[in-house]
Amino acid sequence: MEKVVSKHRVALVTNAADYAGPPAFSALIAAGFRVLVHDNAFGEPATWSAFLRNHPGAERILAEHPAELIEAVWMKEGRLDALVSNDHYPAPQSAFTTTELTHLRNTLEALLVRPFALLQAAVPKLKRQGGANIVLITSCRTRSPIAGGAVPDAARAAANALVRSLSVELAPDNIAINAIAPNFLYSEAYYPRSVFVESPRGKAYIDAHVPIGRLGRPEEIGEVVSFLATTHARFLTGAVIDFSGGWPATAPRPS
């Protein structure tokens, strides 16, 4: 029996519970996609129920490994038009000399190895279907490194380099791959509301260091995700798009 291929445009958002995951879902639903979401936390019924309550129309895919996730998508839909690899991992500052190698390995696993494996599993299928749009959510934090940030800086720099290199390999197959590289985007993962929105000290820090004077709004990055996921202009590939409100500025904003 021949497998039925979905008549809808299909998108997959990984690590969908936080960072750019929720706004990516909302923007892709608004753009007419059937949106599949994956997050390790969605195995917990309460977490999934809360996400679904706030994001009606989400369809959960449960899989432990990237290759299993891609196979599950194809078994369900038979196609994938847009893949959003939304990768985040805790980034505490730690001195290089005292950083545990397990922290380095775990960070690289989350921000580089897993998205690499995800793309490695997806690309052969995307080639056979005639193309697709891939979006990685990375970071532009390396534009102004800080002491104690060597581990996340190294992982994010590698992910951005991966996008540039893969664009060369994938362009002949009509697969565009681009990255959105945020900093100062509101998310509970990196810039939680209690610290940077509700706290006067946190708000003052943002006002002093971000030229636009506020955190990035989730719906704003959703617009960029939607554009890269829907565009037919696949001549646009290999771009790493800063999403940082003008940061880093050459000098702090005047008080």
Image (cartoon, rainbow, N blue to C red):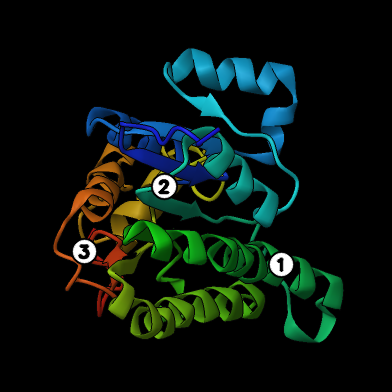
Q: Which residue is drawn at 38% across and 33% down?
A: 6
Q: Which mark is residue 254?
A: 3
Q: Earlier in the sequence, mark 2 or mark 1?
A: 2
Image coordinates of residue 134 in percent, x first then y, are: 38, 60
Q: Earlier in the sequence, mark 2 or mark 3?
A: 2
Q: In this view, does 52 lie above or below 179?
A: above
Image coordinates of residue 143 in percent, x first then y, are: 39, 80
Three-letter code, disc 2: Leu
Q: In this view, does 16 lie above or below 140?
A: above
Q: Which of marks 1 and 3 is nearer the N terminus?
A: 1
Front residue of 6/145: it is: 6
Image coordinates of residue 56 in percent, x first then y, are: 42, 16
Residue 34 shown left or right of residue 253 in the figure: right
Residue 144 visible in the snapshot: no
Label 2, label 1: how far apart the Cα atoms are = 24 Å
Image coordinates of residue 120 in percent, x first then y, are: 57, 69
Quarter location, residue 175: bottom left
Mark 2, Cα crowd under 10 Å, few <14 / some 14-19 / many 20+, is many
Quarter that holds the C terminus: bottom left
Residue 42 shown left or right of residue 131 in the figure: right
Label 2, label 3: how far apart the Cα atoms are = 47 Å
Quarter that holds the N terminus: top right
Three-letter code, disc 3: Pro
Determine which residue is flagged by label 2: 80
Q: Which residue is drawn at 22% across and 44% down?
A: 223
Disc nearest the viewer among 1 and 3: 1
Three-letter code, disc 1: Glu
Dot 3 falls on a residue whose secondary structure is loop
